[in-house]
Amino acid sequence: MRTKAGVRAFDVLSIALAAVLVSCLALPVAVLFFSSTPTEVLQGFRDPLFAPALWLSVRTTLVSLSIIVLTGTPLAWWLARSPRGASWGIKLLVDLPIVIPPAVVGVALLQTFGRQGFLGPVLAGLGISVPFSTAAVVIAQIVVAAPFYVQAGVNAFRSIDGDLLITARTLGASRAGAFFRVALPIALPGLVTGASLAWARALGEFGATLLFAGNFPGVTQTMPLAIFSALEADIGSALVFSLILTAAGAFLLFGLRMAPRGVGWLGGFGVRRFEGEPPHLS
Amino acid sequence: MSWRARLQAAVGPLSLDVDLHGLGTVTALVGPNASGKTTILRTIAGARHPERGEILVDGAVLYRSQDGVDLAMEDRRIGYVPQGYGLFPHLTVLDNVAFGLPRAEGAGRGGRRRSRALAMLEEMGCEELSHRFPKDLSGGEKQRVALARALVIEPRILLLDEPLAALDATSRRLMRRFLADKLRERNQTTLMVTHDPRDVEALDATAWILEAGRVVQSGSLEDLRKNPRTDFVAEFAGVGFAPGS
């Protein structure tokens, strides 16, 4: 028989355990936030490593995210519409990079694109050398970040009632029309969430990039790699770089939380309300 | 207007083998769960492909296995209202109704597309809903909008999948009368799935009774009452048990 004291003890224990985890998550971020003065932050901005690394991170993550969205959307659509049995193997392959350590991904990419790797001789014949280039940074980001987008996309597309697509087709929409006019707008909040997660993952990518692309300022040195380099020379700069990445992450998280509402408003997901005259047809 | 659907298909554990045809303006498809009712509607709409058979509506061949004819869903001109109404949640009522109208007709305020959609909403008595989104509508309003969207394309046949099932008793009664009036006014050939004998009666429909993918009986509600061939038919018609069961 449950006693009042027993229930209370359970509540106290649960809260205490949860508080330990929250402290573990919040403490490092709080310490990081308070470890630099405004003057030190300004000095960090002037560090020669900072601007090229930030610019490279922005450029490479935008390119990798564009490729992920362009290729991941049709893949997610196909995975969502296929019988689970048929798509099981592909889904497993897509998810694999999430559970593989980034360093292993880096080694695998070297084995694939390296001079002595699987595609190395073919690429060399074409005069292309991928490892230790900006292209290698993008490839590493795509491999580690794409699963997050595809996973979110599959969930978003799978939640669409199949009758909506049948209805759209009976109303004259082609397969592509039903996708673009019905499935895509309905799945958009989920896709935006997935894209934000993928971008955050690409922005923070370190291990695979270090092994596959190296750490060359202006060419392959992204923000996480710049932090790694700065730690060896000037911990102040490393702290500032870390603060900036944390701010970018927090911004993305905020965007994630607001995305369904925001995208809903843009696309008219029932959040938007019109007054007066009926709207024009879209 | 006449239609015929002769279908043979294996759908999961269900083996469908039916030969249905329209005997009046409204035809009701009745049967226990998993008897193949929704599968038949989806097959006529073109979302499912039978192994053999033919689907003819108003003289047009939509599907005929013998000749390899299988019109794409978008070319069949079929009005389909699924269970749950299938309204597009990201579009306003007006955009929902105009979805099936040719975009070339113009979407602006003076456009024919918009005026046709508004006229159909007016006919359904819900033009004041045009600026709302489906989530803001009641069950009865959703049903009217879904009906307007299906009818505005002037379909060869209207397929309704349990159109009144999700409504409360009062709305169901009102909507049943509304549906009967509108379909009669427009002389709209309709095939409707239902579990309710009152729908069959109010819409003056001929019923096809399905059990396990086969037609067990057809006729008016009166015919079914007089001579129910199975316990399900007897129970549906409200006469207890079939003779000899």
Image (spheres, rainbow, N blue to C red):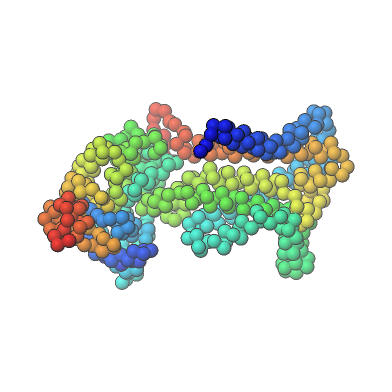
Q: Between residues A262 and B206, which one lies in front from this camera angle?
A: B206
> Which residue is found at the position 28% from the left and 44% from the top?
B164
- Residue B77, relative to residue B186: is it above or below? below
- Residue B23, relative to residue A27: is it above or below? below
Residue A200, percent from left and from top = 67, 44
Residue B76, percent from left and from top = 33, 57
Quadrant of the image containing the C terminus of chain B: bottom left
Quadrant of the image containing the N terminus of chain B: bottom left
Is residue A83 toward the left or the right of residue A72 in the image?
left
> Which residue is found at the position 55% from the left and 50% from the top?
A153
Residue A5, percent from left and from top = 57, 32
Q: How many marks?
A: 0
Q: Kindly give the residue lying farthest to the bottom in the view shown.
A: B66
- Residue A244, relative to residue A95: is it above or below? above
Q: Is residue B56 visible?
A: no
Q: Between residues B111 and A124, which one lies in front from this camera angle?
A: A124
> Which residue is found at the position 57% from the left and 44% from the top?
A192
Is residue B52 toward the left or the right of residue A212 in the image?
left
Residue B99, percent from left and from top = 38, 45
Q: Between residues A72 and A276, which one lies in front from this camera angle?
A: A72
> Which residue is found at the position 37% from the left and 58% from the top?
B47
Q: Quadrant of residue B229?
A: bottom left
Q: Kindly give the residue lying farthest to the right in the view shown.
A: A233
Q: Is residue A179 visible?
A: yes
Is residue A175 toward the left or the right of residue B215 in the image?
right
- Residue B55, relative to residue B155: is it above or below? below
Q: Quadrant of residue A243?
A: top right
Q: Kindly give the residue lying farthest to the front in the view shown.
A: A1
